[in-house]
Amino acid sequence: VKVDVARLGARLICLVSALTVCFTLISFIHISSKIQKTENEILGKQAAFKAKSQVIWAELIEAGRTLRIP
């Protein structure tokens, strides 16, 4: 009877270990996907900010030229 309990316990431990590995892999994939999505959002916002700042800078330079008194 003890041998059957030991085998059952070993199988249960193996099952729990396999489920833990699967859960870890799924979690890793999910976290990696979220990181990639966030990185893409940040890069998009960074590009928009850079474009807007270049437009503002060009407008400031142009305004400075027109305000100069000869």
Image (cartoon, helix red, strand yellow):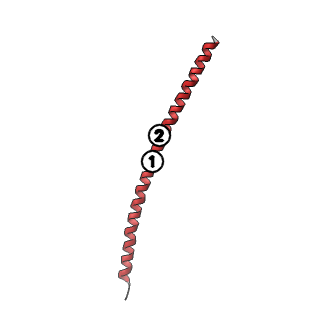
Q: Residue drawn 41% across and 63% down? A: 50
Dot 2 amino acid type:
Ile
Where is residue 70? Give x, y as percent.
37, 89
Extreme residue toward the right, this view: 2
**Rendered view: 8 above or below 24:** above
Q: Quadrant of residue 49?
A: bottom left
Q: Is residue 33 left or right of residue 20?
A: left
Residue 48 circle label: none
Q: Which mark is residue 36?
A: 1
Instruction: Say which residue label 2 marks.
Output: 29
Q: Residue at x 37, y 72 (%)?
A: 58
Q: Residue furthest bottom?
A: 70
Residue drawn at x 37%, y 68% is 55
**Dot 1: within a 10 Å radius of its alpha carbon, few (fewer than 14), some, or many (20 or more) residues?**
few
Q: Position of residue 52 (x, y in %)?
A: 38, 65
> What is the quadrant of residue 63 in the picture?
bottom left
Under mark 1, the amino acid is Gln
1 to 23, vertically: above or below? above
Location of residue 69 with respect to 8 vertically, above or below: below
Q: CA distance from mark 1 to mark 2?
A: 11 Å
Q: How many marks?
A: 2
Q: Quadrant location of residue 69?
A: bottom left
In the image, taking residue 63 as reference, residue 7 lies left or right, namely right
